[in-house]
């Protein structure tokens, strides 16, 4: 039987290739994911090991208290140990580099770091040399390139108190082994200058050259950890490699989606193949093959197909991984990568997944092959899966129960449960359950959906169009299994499109509602204050109609750490209009009162009518809560009147400034006016609500593009399934096609018939996916937050259906050409 199976595979190479394509793509995605992340891990480990080789021992704080730092006196004690040739203390904190435009560089302040010279220099100096005096600095190479600085330039850097200092650039350094510096950019100084600029009082780490481990541990005591150079390299690599684990998990989820779609395609393919080979199976039974041998033959065939597809998938995965590595390296060249890393684990997992998925997908068709009586099979002349389809009582019950359970869980997650992460998980689970119901009921839905999808083609396409629609409807099981694979991909893409559109609509609504000002000014790290002089400069500008200051103070409220805020009194109710849930704004502006947001009001002792004991500069004072406002917006927590805040804590500079400009001036002119007022203050970062919305929209669109690209693989596999089904259908309908040609159907009409058939199948799958995606996108949107706004991207979801239909038509090109080329006489004579 094995020889018979292998001979059948050799005789039908095209069938083998078509069946293996789906599994190749799925395995390729999974193995490519492992190749990408393994190679990144290997590159990270190599990079950090090379850096740590320069260090004999490193002293760091214990993991349970990493923020306490290493005291400066310990450096002298370690330096005095016998055999120690050098000790360097690593200093790290905030030191904002000022660009040529006079503003602090980046959205976050650059990292101020100590850069030693000599053996313990762990960073690569790309140009120049390390700093050696108080007036010298080195810049991160990427930041310097972006800002137009080079060796010999003079730059301004802000210290911890945001005072400007001038330095001469003596070198450009690659700080790639430091993850925070890579993200924010960095400026480097000698150790003493780094402490002055960052305001740090302790070292982040001590690096030691020479000495013995025992002596260093004795000097460090039990409060600090001592690592060898090799241990330090492994520690740094683990810290840097954490992100690759997240990347791997995310990509594998999409890989599993691809494998699910592959399984559906393979199941459908084997179902068609078995049905087409009923006569062959019956003949084998007649000449003595047992049911077990027939079953084993089909399973063996699936195992061979799985093996071939998996091997091809591994090769494709290496290519995909290498391509992804090139892309990653262009985006972030901090970690050098060598050739792709194909681990034994990757090979084993790829082969196992491919073969197991293929064999499992073929089990039901193989079981069906053993149930057909030889005589009945020899007489059978019906197209497999054709005839009037009835769902049947068991299948109907299963579909109804799963559908009802999915809907109930969806309503529970989106309507009943408290909004948040748990509710979203519930909606996701409900979507999976309801999808199973759709799989069970899909064969019964093919005919009505086929009439809907084929209405226009049947009317406009003439006889070929009507024949195509009839062909798509007459084998409901086959069409259902073919289209459900496309439903998965299009459904997930529609879901992400709806969630993204709803997220943008919600954010836009909140901006309009809570930020009725055009510009917001804050410090670079969102943690400092702005000079009141900036407010005065803005108020003098003719383009400005309103300036609002927010102030805050960390203090004790009832024994708990709390932040007290205030806002310019004249702006409340005019420029800024908080949504009052309890009490009134007027009541909250009286002396000795406060208002809190709805989330704060839920805590014990923070509700309406409660009195808070607030510690001030002059002792503890009682503050009564007289109003509760809706959470969100440009302030939160406990808000007191402006006069009370000044009385409690004294005069404070604003933490944020909000600027309203005249409506009759262009946005560009308003932006120039605000920028000119803020130019003398380097730490002040100006952002407009329109720019913020644009940034947020771009981020959401980028995520959607990434998700769409990854899910596009599932759609590609599904389209291969349509092409596969049509190709096999052309083979089994050879006599039928020849008869139609003999009755007057031209080659062009035959090709059109098969193209329209693929179009109808693709539209059925895409339409079902869009309906599911939109429905569960609505549920997911309402599960996120109570104030989420549902938005339906009509053009996008319509585009999904149109593109799927067009892609399905393209997938039919090769099968249609094959059918048109077949000889009429030979096909009619073939039995």
Image (cartoon, rainbow, N blue to C red):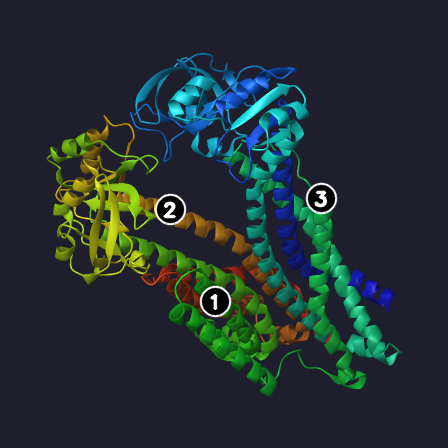
| Mark 1 vs 3, N-terminal side | 3
Question: x and y percent of residue 424 in the render?
Answer: 45, 63
Is any part of residue 813 visible from this angle? no
The mark found on residue 764 in the picture is none
Residues under numbered marks 1 and 3 in contact, where contact means CB atoms less than 8 Å apart: no
Residue at 73% over, 60% down? 355
Q: Would residue 142 appear left or right of 324 to someone viewing this image?
A: left
Distance of label 2 from label 3 (alpha carbons): 37 Å
Question: x and y percent of residue 228 in the render?
Answer: 65, 28
The image quadrant where one finds the N terminus is bottom right
The residue where tag 3 is placed is: 343
Question: x and y percent of residue 69 in the render?
Answer: 49, 30
The residue where tag 1 is placed is: 426
| Picture layout, residue 531 above or below residue 581 | above
Is any part of residue 788 visible from this angle? yes
Q: Residue furthest right?
A: 288
Residue at 35% over, 27% down? 160
Number of residues whose C-alpha sits closer than 10 Å to that of mark 1, classed few (under 14), some (14–19) or many (20 or more): many
The residue where tag 2 is placed is: 698
């Amino acid at each position: 039987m094995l020889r018979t199976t292998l001979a059948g595979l050799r005789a039908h190479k095209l069938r083998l290739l078509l069946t293996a394509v789906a599994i190749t793509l799925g395995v390729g995605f999974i193995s490519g994911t492992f190749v990408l992340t393994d190679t990144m891990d290997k590159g990270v480990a190599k990079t950090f090991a090379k850096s740590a080789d320069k260090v004999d021992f490193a002293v760091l704080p214990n993991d349970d208290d990493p923020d306490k730092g290493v005291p400066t006196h310990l450096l002298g004690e370690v330096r005095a140990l016998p055999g120690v040739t050098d000790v360097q203390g690593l200093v790290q904190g905030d030191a904002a580099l000022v660009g040529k435009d006079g503003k602090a560089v980046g959205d976050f302040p650059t990292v101020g770091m100590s850069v030693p010279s000599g053996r313990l220099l762990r960073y690569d100096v790309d140009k120049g040399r390390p700093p050696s005096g108080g007036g010298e600095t080195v810049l991160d190479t990427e930041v310097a390139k972006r800002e137009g600085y080079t060796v010999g330039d003079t730059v301004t850097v802000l210290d911890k108190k945001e005072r400007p200092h001038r330095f001469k650039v003596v070198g450009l350094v690659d700080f790639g082994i430091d993850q925070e510096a890579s993200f924010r950019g960095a400026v480097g100084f000698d150790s003493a200058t780094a402490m002055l600029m960052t305001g740090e009082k302790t070292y982040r780490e001590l690096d030691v050259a020479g000495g013995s481990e025992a002596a260093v541990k004795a000097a460090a005591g039990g409060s600090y950890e001592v690592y060898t150079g090799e241990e330090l390299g492994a520690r740094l690599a683990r810290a840097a490699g954490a992100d690759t684990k997240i990347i791997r998990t995310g990509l594998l989820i999409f890989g599993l989606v691809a494998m699910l779609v592959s399984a559906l395609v393979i199941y459908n393919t084997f179902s068609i193949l078995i049905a087409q080979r009923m006569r062959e199976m019956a003949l084998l039974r007649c000449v003595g093959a047992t049911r077990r041998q027939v079953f084993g033959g089909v399973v063996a065939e699936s195992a061979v197909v799985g093996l071939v597809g998996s091997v091809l998938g591994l090769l494709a995965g290496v290519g995909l991984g290498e391509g992804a590595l090139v892309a990653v390296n262009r985006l972030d060249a901090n970690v050098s990568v060598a050739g792709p890393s194909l681990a034994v684990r990757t090979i084993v997992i790829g082969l196992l997944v491919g073969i197991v998925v293929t064999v499992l997908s073929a089990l039901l068709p193989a079981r069906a092959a053993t149930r057909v009586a030889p005589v009945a099979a020899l007489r059978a002349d019906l197209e497999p899966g054709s005839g009037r389809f009835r769902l049947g009582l068991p299948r109907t019950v299963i579909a109804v129960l799963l559908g009802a359970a999915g809907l109930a869980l969806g309503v529970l997650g989106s309507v009943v449960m408290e909004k948040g992460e748990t509710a979203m998980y519930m909606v996701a689970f409900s979507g999976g359950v309801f999808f199973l119901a759709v799989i069970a009921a899909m064969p019964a839905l093919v005919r009505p959906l086929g009439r809907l999808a084929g209405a226009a083609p049947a009317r406009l396409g003439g006889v070929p169009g009507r024949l195509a629609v009839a062909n798509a409807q007459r084998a409901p099981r086959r069409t259902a299994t073919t289209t459900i694979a496309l439903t998965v991909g299009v459904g997930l893409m529609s879901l992400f499109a709806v969630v993204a559109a709803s997220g943008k609509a919600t954010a836009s609504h909140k901006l309009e509602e809570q930020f009725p000002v055009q510009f917001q000014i804050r410090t670079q790290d969102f943690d400092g204050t702005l000079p009141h002089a900036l407010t005065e400069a803005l108020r003098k500008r003719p383009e400005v109609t309103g300036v609002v200051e927010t102030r805050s103070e960390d203090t004790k409220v009832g024994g708990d750490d709390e932040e007290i805020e205030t806002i310019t009194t004249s702006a409340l109710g005019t420029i800024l209009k908080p949504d009052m849930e309890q009490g009134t704004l007027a009541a909250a502006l009286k002396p000795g009162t406060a208002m809190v947001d709805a989330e704060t009001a839920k805590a014990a002792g923070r509700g309406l009518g409660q009195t808070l004991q607030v510690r001030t500069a002059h002792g503890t004072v009682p503050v009564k809560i007289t109003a509760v406002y809706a959470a969100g917006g440009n302030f939160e927590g406990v808000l007191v009147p402006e006069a009370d805040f000044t009385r409690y804590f004294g005069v404070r500079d604003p933490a944020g400034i909000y600027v309203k400009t005249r409506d009759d001036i262009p946005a560009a002119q308003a932006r120039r006016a605000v920028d000119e007022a803020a130019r003398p203050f380097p730490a002040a970062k100006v952002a407009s609500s329109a720019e913020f919305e644009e940034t947020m929209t771009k981020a959401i669109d980028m995520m959607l593009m990434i998700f769409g690209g990854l899910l596009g693989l599932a759609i590609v596999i599904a389209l291969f399934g349509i092409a596969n089904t049509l190709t096999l259908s052309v083979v089994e309908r050879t006599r039928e096609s020849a008869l139609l040609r003999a009755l007057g159907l031209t080659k062009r009409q035959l090709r059109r018939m098969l193209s329209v058939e693929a179009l109808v199948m693709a539209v059925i799958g895409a339409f079902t996916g869009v309906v599911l995606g939109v429905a569960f996108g609505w549920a997911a949107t309402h599960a996120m937050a109570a104030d989420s706004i549902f938005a339906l991207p009509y053009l996008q979801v319509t585009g999904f259906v149109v593109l799927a239909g067009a892609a399905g038509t393209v997938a039919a090109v090769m099968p249609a050409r094959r059918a048109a080329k077949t000889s009429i006489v030979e096909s009619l004579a073939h039995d």
